[in-house]
Amino acid sequence: MLRHRNEFPVEGELPAFDGATTWLNGRPLRPEDLGGRVVLVSFGTYTCINWLRSLPYVRAWADKYASHGLVVVGVQTPEFDFEGDLGHVGRAIEEMRVRYPVAVDNDYAVWRAFDNHYWPALYFADAQGRIRHHHFGEGEYEESEMVLQMLLREAGADIDQGLVELRPDGVEAAADWAALGSPESYVGYGRAVGFASPGGLVPDERHGYTAPAGLRRNQWALSGDWRVGVEAAVLIAPGGTISYRFHARDLHLVVGPPAARPPVRFTVRIDGQPPGHAGGVDVDEAGDGTADYPRMYQLIRQRPPIGDRLCEIEFLDAGVEAYVFTFG
């Protein structure tokens, strides 16, 4: 149930977006552009699985309530360096059908102005420019939409009580939380855990890795010629592999070639076999796929029953950069 309006006290004034590096999908929004409008600010970064799974709802609210006085503002604050590339960001938000204005926040200025710490994060401002509610992470979509309706009614809009009805699919589908037994796992040595190749990670140097005979749940390994940096592992010679033993319906990998480099081909195996119907949206049934720019690729979406499975990704071309595994 939605709390009474008096339980949504003023949390602060809506900060300006002056620190944005640039804007996509429109001109810069100034405070005077937002006066008298209810504003929903959505922080995200385009490779974040949690933001991707919340996106269908933000997109739907932007479409449904624009004519009633709602302004949705996206804030793209990068987690990885490549997410500051305007070509990558522009392509990603077009592919994701994001049509509302997006402030590119490469310097974290907007992030700091909001004192934000999360992807995704939603901030709800009333028509007087006061933040009245916030939500961090996925979920609580019905409550969030009811907050928007309440603020729009306060501003004089005639809003019915019906809520959007969505069935997100592909990478935007809700996680299978009951079966999810694998955490986000970074590949760069700055935040890597669970690495199991003999000898461990060799920071910032070209090194020949091998995979152990067996991996336990949530362990991963490299094989082939790689250089592991703070953020990513870079494949030096074709034929390198990343292996991960996971427990989840979905397995994703943030991966891609550097800017201005050609696409990289890869092949996915699950328990040593082509994935077939367990392949994600970015591979075919034979397990073949191509990474043409850095983003999150869904490699596995398996059917129940969910158990521990071994995923092996072999890259047929050198130069690929691998950043983080996520699961759903």
Image (cartoon, rainbow, N blue to C red):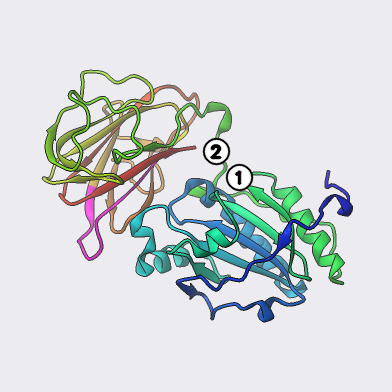
Q: Which of the labelled discs sits on residue 255, or is there none?
A: none
Horizontally, residue 161 falls left or right of residue 172, namely: right
> Residue at point 22% right, 66% down?
260
Instruction: Tell me the SS state at disc 2.
Output: loop
Horizontally, residue 300 falls left or right of residue 145, namely: left
Q: Position of residue 321 (x, y in %)?
A: 25, 49
Instruction: Tell me the SS state at disc 1.
Output: loop
Q: Position of residue 57 (x, y in %)?
A: 64, 55
> Residue at point 25% right, 41% down?
267
Looking at the picture, tell me which residue is in the foreground, 231 or 238.
Answer: 231
Q: Name the amino acid, label 2.
A: Ala
Q: Which of the labelled discs sits on residue 138, or is there none?
A: 1
Q: Quadrant of residue 222?
A: top left
Horizontally, residue 160 falls left or right of residue 74, namely: right
Q: Position of residue 165 (x, y in %)?
A: 70, 53
Residue 163 is at least partly visible in this image: no
Q: Relative to 123, is 268 above or below?
A: above
**Magenta segment boundaries in residue numbering:** 252-265
Q: Which residue is mark 2?
A: 175
Residue 67 is at least partly visible in this image: yes
Asked if the stretch drawn in magenta spans residue 171, the answer is no
| Label 1 Cα crowd, 10 Å radius (few <14 / some 14-19 / many 20+) | some
> Residue at point 47% right, 49% down?
48
**Mark 2 touches mark 1? (CB < 8 Å):** yes
| Label 2 Cα crowd, 10 Å radius (few <14 / some 14-19 / many 20+) | some
Q: Quadrant of the N terminus?
A: top right
Circle nearer the N terminus (2, 1): 1
